[in-house]
Amino acid sequence: MAPFKLIFIGFLFLCISKVHAQKHPVFYAGFEGYRHTDFEDNSFGKFSVGSQIYQIKFFAPEIGFDYGGGTLPERTVFGEDFTIQDPRKGLLKQRFKFSVFTLNPKLKFGEEDAYITFSPKYHIGKLIGEAAYLVYSGDNKRYIGVKESEESKIKTSFWSFAIGFEGIQISPRYWFALSIQYTLVDANEVWDTMEFSTEDAFMQSASTPTIGLGFRFYYNPFASKND
């Protein structure tokens, strides 16, 4: 029975391909910025590239690649030998970055030049954490070098969700999209794997799931009046 099922599925696909609105891939590039008070300058962000593979009525799935991350505010660390007369201290720096592939079964509702979109995106890839403990020199009144450093790489997967508006059209080939984003990326996954020997130089934690804004530019190189 398996060959007949495959033939039947192939027949359905051919039938559907005759009615979909988009016959060719559409490419995109974009940026998302997230507001979060735990981070330096109160924000972190990511860049994205990818393709809307096709569109069948309101179903417009996308695949892509995202790269992003953020930096925590620098934190002064007073070591075990700290006294008022001899304020020996250090500086702790932390940042994270991620590179992930995305699968997005995007839904689009509306007309050609004014779509409301909903995107439940699944991300899978790599999360990298970096941390450095710098030594302070009272004589020079500056941090003179790295005493310890840590780097950790782990596999990660997470969801993000977006509601937006797509169809700010320059021409049939070019248009823009704006969206409100909510990401569930968790940088604590990687910082939990890192540790300094200095007792007071413990890793800062940050709840990275948060809300942000997204901007995308779409390009359809195959646009025609029959597409």
Image (cartoon, grey):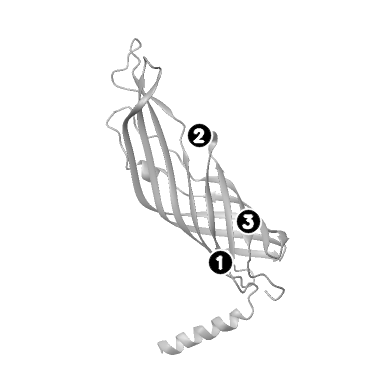
Give the secondary structure at mark 3. strand
Amino acid type at circle 3 is Phe
How far across and how far down the image is residue 118, in percent? 60, 59
Is 80 or 25 nearer to us in this picture?
25
Q: State the separation of the CA atoms marked 3 and 1.
A: 16 Å
* Image marks 3 and 1: residues in contact by CB distance under 8 Å: no
Residue that mark 2 sits on? 40
Say what amino acid the circle numbered 1 marks: Pro
Front-lying residue, 24 or 163: 24
Q: CA distance from mark 3 to mark 2?
A: 27 Å
* SS assignment at label 1: loop
Pointer 3 or 1: first along the chain: 1
Q: Is residue 77 left or right of residue 26?
A: left
Q: Amino acid at mark 2?
A: Glu
Q: Residues within 10 Å of mark 3 (few under 14, many from 20)?
A: some
Q: Residues within 10 Å of mark 2 (few under 14, many from 20)?
A: some
- Residue 217, disc: 3
| 188 relative to 60, above or below | above
Specify whether 78 is left or right of 17: left
Residue at the location (44% across, 38% down)? 206
Q: Tags 3 and 2 in contact by the CB under 8 Å rule?
A: no
Residue farthest toward the top in the current orientation of the protein: 85
Rendered image quadrant of residue 132: top left
Q: Callout 1 environment at 10 Å: few (<14), some (14 to 19), or many (20+)?
A: some
Which label belongs to residue 61? 1
Provide residue 21's location: percent of width, then percent of height: 65, 73
